[in-house]
Image: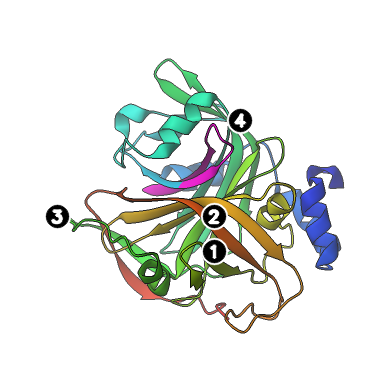
């Protein structure tokens, strides 16, 4: 593929970070279809993560799950979502947003093996199901993923906690939604040691940007479109915190209240909306270990 696959925002951050050459080397992994191994991996995942955009242009990150067959491949360039097999919250904002037939980003991540795969495309209603046209599909490295084993939990969960600072103090994993100026969406993973996100105040979080694949899909989107969504999952009971707002990117600073692992990059998340809910049912996990790549 040629270097034109990256948009202006991605190119800007690549150049400012001195990683443009590495980004061009890595772009060859991006395709508009799924190889057999990727299909098997995706269809074996019990949960996955999605980004969507509402009518106001705000972006959201969500977690979805369903019975076997909830998500399946239909030809090399399309995935099919069957809402009849949904097992996560039917009230998630994702289902309202996709009625607009806009872009969608998907992230499949197997916490136990630290494997992950991203699919970006466009979603359309079709005979009671949802067809996702694959525009970009590519694997991601295992860095910063904390290993967990997903297990069933048939006990009742308490109401979701509604204290932002408490959620941030306990978080070692978040999921970030972003979009470019054309409404093309992406959702990515960010991980670190417990409390790696700095709580600044009730409207501001500070997230470090560690060494990655040099493509800067998320920060590149933020450069041209500051709309940002953030999802935190309580892996003990399936409760979630969804936030939507704006991102302010810092490419060459090292503040005292966040560790960037030497990149001198971070972004401030300005919160405009928040939703606390029970997104996953009969859900829990067993923590195994932190990533050895965490700064």
Q: Is residue 11 left or right of residue 292?
A: right
In terms of secondary structure, where does tag 3 sit?
A: loop
Q: Residues within 10 Å of mark 4 (few under 14, many from 20)?
A: some
Q: Which residue is mark 1?
A: 190
Q: Nearer the viewer, residue 273 or 61?
A: 273
Marks 1 and 2: CB-CB under 8 Å?
A: yes
Marks 2 and 4: CB-CB under 8 Å?
A: no
Measured in 3D between alpha carbons, the distance from the residue under mark 1 to the one under mark 4, in whole angstroms, is: 27 Å
Q: Which mark is residue 156?
A: 3
Q: Position of residue 154 (x, y in %)?
A: 15, 54
Measured in 3D between alpha carbons, the distance from the residue under mark 4 to the one under mark 3, in whole angstroms, is: 40 Å
Given this view, does label 1 or label 4 mark the residue nearer the observer?
1
Q: Which mark is residue 77?
A: 4
Q: Position of residue 122 (x, y in %)?
A: 59, 31
Looking at the image, the residue that sits furthest to the bottom is 256
Q: Residues within 10 Å of mark 1 (few under 14, many from 20)?
A: some
In terms of secondary structure, where does tag 4 sit?
A: loop
Looking at the image, the residue that sits furthest to the left is 155
Q: Position of residue 226 (x, y in %)?
A: 66, 50
Marks 3 and 2: CB-CB under 8 Å?
A: no
Q: Which residue is mark 2?
A: 176
Choose the circle earlier in sequence order: 3 or 1: 3
Measured in 3D between alpha carbons, the distance from the residue under mark 2 to the one under mark 4, in whole angstroms, is: 24 Å
Residue 83 position (above or below residue 293): above
The magenta-colored residue range is 45-61
Measured in 3D between alpha carbons, the distance from the residue under mark 3 to the one under mark 2, in whole angstroms, is: 28 Å
Would you say residue 60 sits in the magenta stretch? Answer: yes
């Amino acid at each position: 593929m040629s270097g034109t696959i990256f948009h202006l925002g991605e190119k800007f951050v690549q150049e400012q970070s001195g990683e443009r050459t590495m980004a061009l080397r890595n772009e060859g992994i991006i395709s508009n279809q799924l190889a057999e191994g990727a299909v098997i991996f995706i269809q074996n995942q019990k949960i996955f993560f999605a980004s969507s955009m509402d009518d106001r242009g705000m972006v959201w990150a969500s977690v979805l799950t369903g019975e076997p067959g909830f998500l399946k491949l239909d030809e090399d360039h399309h995935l099919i979502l069957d809402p009849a097999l949904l097992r996560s919250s039917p009230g998630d904002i994702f289902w309202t947003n996709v009625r607009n037939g806009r872009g969608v980003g998907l992230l499949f991540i197997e916490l136990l093996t630290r494997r992950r795969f991203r699919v970006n495309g466009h979603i359309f209603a079709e005979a009671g199901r949802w067809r996702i046209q694959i525009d970009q599909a590519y694997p991601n490295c295992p860095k910063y993923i904390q290993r967990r084993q997903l297990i069933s939990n048939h006990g009742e969960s308490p109401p979701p906690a509604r204290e932002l600072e408490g959620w941030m103090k306990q978080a070692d994993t978040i999921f970030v939604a972003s979009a470019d100026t054309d409404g093309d969406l992406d959702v990515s993973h960010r991980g670190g040691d417990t409390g790696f996100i700095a709580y600044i105040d009730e409207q501001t979080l500070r997230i470090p940007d560690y060494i990655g694949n040099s493509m800067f899909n998320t920060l590149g989107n933020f450069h041209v479109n500051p709309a940002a969504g953030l999802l935190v999952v309580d892996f003990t009971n399936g409760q979630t915190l969804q936030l939507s707002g704006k991102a302010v990117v810092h490419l060459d600073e090292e503040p005292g209240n966040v560790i960037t692992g030497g990149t001198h990059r971070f972004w401030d998340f300005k919160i405009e909306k928040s939703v606390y809910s029970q997104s996953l049912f009969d859900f829990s996990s067993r923590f195994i270990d932190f990533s050895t790549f965490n700064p």
